[in-house]
Image (tube, grey):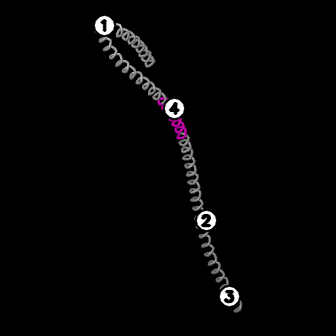
Amino acid sequence: NLEDDQLLFLEREEKAKAEILQLLGKEEQNGTSRSKAICTELRIDLEFLKAHHQNAIKKIKSLESQQTTLNDFIKVLGNERESLRADSAGRKACIESLETERSHLIGRIRMLELEDSERNLSLTNKELEVRSISSTLKETREEIELLKSDRQQLERQINDMKNKLSLTELKV
């Protein structure tokens, strides 16, 4: 891991600085005034670098924490994506099921419409038959009325003939 390598490097560097500071401390105690001044400047520079490195270590640790948080967040997003895919697949299956049901219902409606059309046609045929029978019945009634009228006329004629015959018989 890159962060671990950087931390290891910084820790080694810290140890090396500590050793240098020890050597500088010995030189400051035992050395010449010029070497003591140089050692003091080096000590100040090393202290500055030490503080800088400690800040770098803190930043690296903070970045590692952020990286862990980001990795956790990426896992959560991955899980959410999978969940959404599963939901999407479920919805797709539901939609396909509803479309199939819709097709079945449309087919059933068409069958019912066809049956209704057949019933209407059958009713229309029956209405025509009833009209035809009604018309035939009317014609038959008219013929019966004509026949009654003819019968009445014939009966009158017969009665007239009977009367004439009776009169003729009386005359004879």
C-alpha separation, residue under disc 3 versus residue under disc 2: 43 Å
On the image, numbered disc 4 is attached to which residue?
79
On the image, numbered disc 2 is attached to which residue?
133
Which marked residue is nearer to the observer: mark 1 or mark 2?
1
C-alpha separation, residue under disc 4 versus residue under disc 2: 79 Å
Q: Amino acid at mark 3?
A: Asn
C-alpha separation, residue under disc 1 versus residue under disc 2: 146 Å
Q: Which residues are magenta?
A: 73-95
Q: Residue at x 62, y 70 (%)?
A: 140
Label 1 with label 2: CB-CB less than 8 Å: no
Tag 2 or tag 3, which sits nearer the N-term? Answer: 2
Magenta region includes residue 22: no
For residue 155, side relative to residue 107 (left or right): right
Crowding at mark 3 (Cα within 10 Å: few <14, some 14-19, many 20+)? few
On the image, numbered disc 1 is attached to which residue?
32
Label 3 with label 2: CB-CB less than 8 Å: no
C-alpha separation, residue under disc 4 versus residue under disc 1: 68 Å
Q: How many marks?
A: 4
Crowding at mark 1 (Cα within 10 Å: few <14, some 14-19, many 20+)? few
Q: Looking at the image, which residue sits at the far bottom?
A: 171
Tell me residue 38's x, y (percent): 30, 11
Which marked residue is nearer to the observer: mark 4 or mark 2?
4
Tell me residue 118's x, y (percent): 58, 53
Q: Secondary structure at mark 3?
A: helix
Q: Which quadrant of the structure image shows residue 56?
A: top left
Crowding at mark 2 (Cα within 10 Å: few <14, some 14-19, many 20+)? few
Q: Amino acid at mark 1?
A: Thr
Is residue 23 placed above or below 50 in the rendered structure? above
